Image: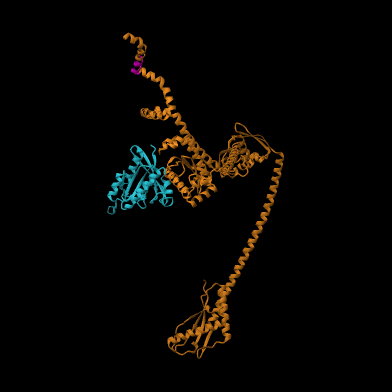
Chain colours: A cyan, B orange
Amino acid sequence: MTAITKKICLVGDFAVGKTSLVARFVKNVFNEKYITTVGVKIDTKQQQVGEHELKLVIWDIAGENAIAGTRASYLRGASGYLLVADGTRPDTLETAIDIKRQVDAIVGEVPFVGLLNKVDLTDLWDIPESQFDGLLARGWDFVKTSAMSGEGVEQAFERLGARLLEQ
Amino acid sequence: MEELRELLFGGERQRLDKLSRRLEDPRVRARDLALVLPDSLTVSAHAHPERLKSALQRPVEQCIQESVSRDKKFFADILFPVIGPAIRKSIAEALREFVTSINEAVEHTFSPTGIRWRLEALRTRKTFGEVVLKHTLVYRVDQVFLIENNSGRLMHHASHPDAFSQDSDAVSAMLTAIQDFMQDSFATGEENPLHTVEMGEYLLYLAHGPHATLAGLVRGVAPPELRERFNALLDVLHDRHRGLLMRFDGNRQHLAKLAPMFDDLLLSAARPRRRLTLWKSPALWLVLALVLASGVWLYRDYQQRLTAERLQSAFSGEPGIVLLDVARAGSDFTVSGLADPLARRPEEILAALRLEDVDVRLDFAPYTAAGGQFDLARARRALQVPDSVITRLRPDGVLELAGFAPGEWIERLRSTVLLAPGVSGLDLRALEVDPGELEALRRQQAERERAERGRAAAQRALDEQRRAEAARQREQRLAEQRRAETERLANEARLVALGGELESRVFRFAQGDTLAADDAFVAETGERVAEIMALCERLARDCRIEVFGFTDGIGTDERNAALRAARATAVRERLSQAGNSDEWFSIVDPGPARTGLADPALRKAQLRLAGTGPR
């Protein structure tokens, strides 16, 4: 069966662990230096969603507070995205909210899954529950992940994949 | 009312009833439907192709699946006309490429170019195949990507079987990202997209359309028309398949039918191969050398066979020769067999063949050939038949001799008992003594007798002369013996006389024991001794002269013995000084004097001849 290809983007603030998050779960094709040079690194991930074979082409876009210029064009044509924040840094969630707004402006309302990363550092966990609940109430879908242990990562991809095929 | 209804709707009711029956009866309905179904499908295929496909897809797939699972052979038979040629074409293509690659590998492996390329491969750490490709290929389209402009997703990918290929989806996306990066970084805008990227020996062609970008990775130097091919394909895609491009949802299966168009773009062109001029081909030279060597070998073999046949023919046809074998070892021959001594010598036969540059060894053992010719020849030789006599061997084995021959020989022949092999008897009736021969024989006989007589007379004279000489020599010997005997006797007499005379000579010693003899006496005595010794030598006697020293009876015996010895020694020394040899003398002590008185006469020394007996 031929896989259906979908472009997704990986966006989030600086050092929230986007690249580490996916490094163990994707097919690495290009060197990570692309992120710092071209501003994006492409990986692919194949997964089974129901009876469909789905191939995700993941655009790991360099983290920045605002998406503009080059990075804006990298978002073009994305079918969905993973929005990453660092659970130990509440400001990254704020940035994520901001980034989501920018992404929606560029690509429209497409499926996304929020990733609260570094769940392994529970002692340093610093996201106010109120803020978290607020986002859930706005329909955000969150998965707590850990690049260190791999917890939640597959789940996040699967959830986004399923939502892409629902479209 | 009924009638009225019948009048008003009777016809309609009948049609309704008829229609109702048609609709209720499945067989009638199926027959009716069969009449309109083909037309209905045709109309639907034109009006709603997608709906029709969608409707038929599932049942058709299920039918095929069912059919295959039930009878695979039936389906294989249906597909055979299609698959057979395709497989043959594929195999033929694979074989052609295989043969080409073998040809190139062989050509490039053993040629100077091949060695140079191998060194290059070692130096650049590339495989030999890559280096060969680099040098033999002008260009090759390794990969073709059709990329959706908006998302960078890969819509189709085609690649050369030998080309290295990464994850094409990732490559396609990254290519799009890089284009975006270039456009955004240098603010060129979408109206100035990237057309060409050069990377070493690779060239990336990019042809841009409204919905998709066609990218081709070209290795080598591509001709300008290649870009035209890319643009042309992109135009075709946007013109004829715009819907497919626009509706692309990530499922490449929908574009699968376009695959042949992309495969056609996987073009390549090999460098025109330099034709190897015939004379430069090592293989040709090798073949020529082999042919030449074979030719030489065959010619030599033919020559040797010819020589063997000539030898065979010459020796086997020769009377008196039995050929056993003609053996060949390289260019040397050994001819072996049996040869009658009366036949032609094998060396002559060989020489008559005039063989050049051939070493022939002859190994013939003697034997006796049977047959008239050899029996006759052997008989002539055995009987020493002169040339003046002709011979014929009759079938019964009797040898007929005719002609003139010496009578003596004829006589000897008559008394011959042992005849030659193959001859049972002699017929001498036609044999006559040669008259001239007889006269000559007589003359020779008389001459011989005369000579014999002369020889006898000479012998007698010689014998007489020898006898006279012997008598004279005998006489001479007797006279000699007599003279010798006389001389011996005289010598012996003289020796006796000289011995007596020597013994009579007394050497006196004066007071103080000095020798009183004078020189004349000593010299005379010495002459006598010398004469005696000469006579002894002549008479073959071992003569010696004994010297005796004497003393009187006064004094001790030891003193007197020493004195005696001293006196004898003094005499010997004087005689030695006079010319006599010391070896002639031997000193003999006569012992003490019998008298105890002083006697001056006893102060003396004397000589005596001894050893005069025969040896």
**On screen, residue B480 above or below B503:** above
Q: Is residue B195 left or right of residue B60?
A: right
**On screen, residue B601 above or below A123:** below
Image mark count: 0
| Residue B362 in view | no
Quarter residue B3 falls in: top left
- State the residue lying farthest toward the bottom: B511
Can residue A54 be found in the magenta stretch?
no
**On screen, residue B161 above or below B15:** below
Quarter residue B530 falls in: bottom right
Residue B610: image x %, image y %?
A: 51, 77
Which one is in front, B577 or B136?
B136
**On screen, residue B66 above or below B580:** above
| Residue B100 in view | yes
Residue B400: image x %, image y %?
A: 64, 34
- Report the quarter where the C terminus of chain A lies: top left
Q: Which residue is at 61% across, 43% downward?
A: B347
- State the residue lying farthest toward the top: B3
Q: Which residues are magenta?
A: B18-26
Which one is in front, B312 or B166?
B166
Principal SS element in the magenta part?
helix
Residue A45: image x %, image y %?
A: 37, 44
Residue B460: image x %, image y %?
A: 66, 54
Q: Which residue is at 27% across, 54% downward?
A: A123
- Report the quarter where the N terminus of chain A lies: top left
Q: Which residue is at 47% across, 31% downward?
A: B85
